[in-house]
Amino acid sequence: MPGEGVLPLALAEGEGEVALLRRAQALGLPVAPTWVVRLEEEFYRLNNLKERLEDLFLGVFGVRIDEERLLWAAEEARRAVRESYLLPERAEAFLAALKGRGPFGVRRAGEGEALWAATPQEALFALKRLWAASFQVEALLGRYPSLLPPFRPVLVQEAGEAVEDPFLSLDLSRALGQEVVVYTWGGQVVRIESPHGG
């Protein structure tokens, strides 16, 4: 199906920040053009990454963590993710959805740190770099004993660096009936944080 795994915000289902952005959009707030990308689980499955990564980390986590082996395995895991392929039709759908647009921020829903890309092709590369970043040593230790990251949606947004908007945060908190912090760029909502998820 065209666009499978890459949907405009208005057509995407989700919880947390995806749901908050959709609710803000439904209330008539200008939300930056946003695409919700759910390709990571398929990417791992089709590239046999789970088994490959488990092999890389054999012997790392025992009674004690083998720090030298951890550093090596983390680097090799990032390389494995970067060098694995998306299905061509998924890559084409991603590029087609973003065609003629940019620049983009690429980030996981619920996280503020974005990777920046000027073109759709650069955004595709940023998506894989974002997935690979899940194998930074700090990220691995933070989710131990789980080796694989949780498969959460990635947001690709046609926007620049967002800043907190305290007045819009207050207005949207009242409208939603829950406390939120809103970040905007160019008068458009880019990110919504909530202590209740998002």
Image (tube, rainbow, N blue to C red):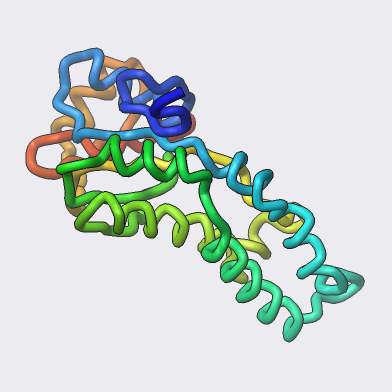
**Quarter of the figure with the C terminus:** top left
Does the rendering let one see residue 181? no
| Residue 71, image quadrant | bottom right
Looking at the picture, tell me which residue is in the foreground, 5 or 88: 88
**Residue 123 at x, y percent in the picture:** 32, 53
Outermost residue to the left = 186
Residue at 73 percent across and 56 percent down: it is 147
- Image height of 105 relative to 140, above or below: above
The x, y position of residue 95, in whole percent, is 31, 43
Q: Residue at x 16, y 43 (%)?
A: 101
Question: Does residue 151 appear to the left or right of 25 in the view shown?
Answer: right
Residue at position x 91%, y 72% in the image: 63
Question: Is residue 117 among what the camera can see?
Answer: yes
Camera-nearest residue between 84 and 109: 84
Residue 150 x/y as whole percent: 62, 44
In the image, residue 119 above or below residue 12: below
Q: In the image as oriented, which residue stretches furthest toward the front?
A: 88
Residue 69 place in picture, x, y as percent? 76, 81
Q: Is residue 89 left or right of residue 47?
A: left
